[in-house]
Amino acid sequence: MMTELINNAEQNLLHTYNRYPIVWERGQGVHLYDLTGKRYLDFVSGIGVFALGYHYASFDDALKTQIDKITHTSNYYYNTPAIEAAAALTSLSGMERVFFTNSGAEAVEGAIKAARKYAYEKDGTTDHEIIAMEHSFHGRTMGALSVTGNPNYREAFEPMIGHIKFARFNDIESVRDLITDKTCAILLETVQGEGGIYPAEEQFLKALRRLCDERDILLILDEIQCGMGRTGTMFAWQRFGVRPDIMTIAKALGGGVPVGAFLMTEQTAACSLKAGDHGSTYGGNPLATAAINKVLELFEADRILDHVNRVTPYLEAGLDRLVKHDYVIARRGFGLLQGLVCKGPVGDIILAALEKGLVLINAGANVIRLIPPLIIEEHHIDEMVEILEQCLTAKES
Ligand SMILES: *Cc1c(COP(=O)(O)O)cnc(C)c1O
């Protein structure tokens, strides 16, 4: 039955993904089940979306309650869940203004527009420049793609939006070299996700903050993958005490309901997007924002951050044991966003793990990415390490 469905999919879907040969039927906790009933331990969580796993506590009930009231208004009116979600996010981030989107890429689009508008308001000119990072990932729409530091993703779609320059990540001199009087923003992921799980270094982030302050340039941090408690603080930059001027979030924000947001400081907002400058039909709809509210409520009530910080050393120790394999070079990452850097491609290891009931994903060709639900327990980590151990041993023999 699964093969038939997969053939059907391949006949009708646009072939933009090389998918693994599995049709998921349902999830429960940190496990996924395919159509044959086979159970898998999930270390992908829908790429960092299911921070609370599947069907966590009263999350579903909160959605159902909201569905029975209203799921969409329009941004020409107010709705209670959006008002509450905006207040909760400003309080958690210490930033002052929120715009809701439906996805991560849209949040990045908004951040780019906000930065250009900020610079335009200041000097009345256009053609301002943004410095982004090599090996970054910010999404697939034209604006987000323009700041994504992977030429393979961009080439066929040129021309990109103009005046984007790429600096080397964690190399402050390479950023400094690109700054001109036209630079309006520096954009980066606090921990690069798709590019291979590269955390920003504290010195680098602090130097960027100083540079931005000196030159009145906006610091934009993309926390779409590394935010929402994933690295042990609500937002990864909070670990360094470096507050951005604009932040993008999505993925885990809605706990499985599509949603994103960009936030900015009051100082930035005062000189940026105004009425008529930006909008979205669905963005901030009551269903999506009810999901945000419930996610944030459960994070707090069940002390999810404490849990992440409690299990992180255990995960790191388990992964460090795997680094002893010949094929594995290093472990990189923070919290429950970790990468095992390998000597070559990891595709066959991921397939072998799937076979054994463990769901993993890569980050670039040579890195196994571990991005489990944040509610993962030590015995799940043991199981993951055990299976990966077997897969690596089999590969090396
Ligand atoms: C996933 C991701 C995006 C894009 O989000 P979509 O919801 O897929 O548009 C942007 N930035 C980062 C860092 C991401 O991980």
Image: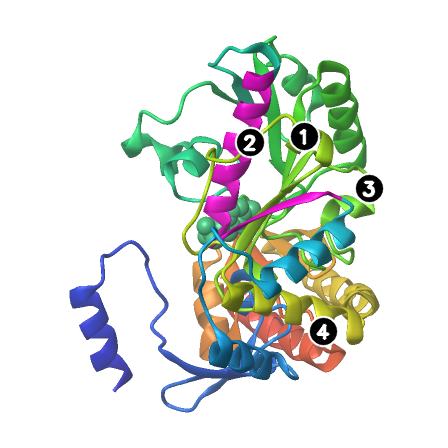
In this view, the mark in front (2 or 4) = 2
Identity, as a three-letter code, of the amino acid under mark 3: Phe
Residue 1: % across, % down: 25, 87
State which tag comes first along the sequence, 2 or 4. 2
**Is residue 59 positioned above or below 165 on the image?**
below
Q: Are marks 3 and 2 in contact (CB under 8 Å)?
A: no
Task: Indicate the colouring scheme.
Answer: rainbow
Identity, as a three-letter code, of the amino acid under mark 2: Ala
Residue lying at 22% horizontally and 57% vertically, measured from the top left: 14
Circle 3 residues within 10 Å: few <14, some 14–19, many ≥20? some
Name the residue beneath numbered marker 2. 114
**Residue furthest top as drawn:** 181
Q: CA distance from mark 3 to mark 2?
A: 24 Å
Dominant secondary-structure state across the stretch colored magenta = helix
Name the residue beneath numbered marker 1. 268
Q: Are marks 2 and 1 in contact (CB under 8 Å)?
A: yes
Circle 4 residues within 10 Å: few <14, some 14–19, many ≥20? some
Circle 2 residues within 10 Å: few <14, some 14–19, many ≥20? many
Q: What label sits on residue 298 in the rendered view?
A: 4
Q: Is residue 175 visible?
A: yes
Residue lying at 56% horizontally and 28% vertically, measured from the top left: 132
| Magenta stretch bounds | 95-121
Asked whether 31 or 65 is in front, the reply is: 65
Identity, as a three-letter code, of the amino acid under mark 1: Thr
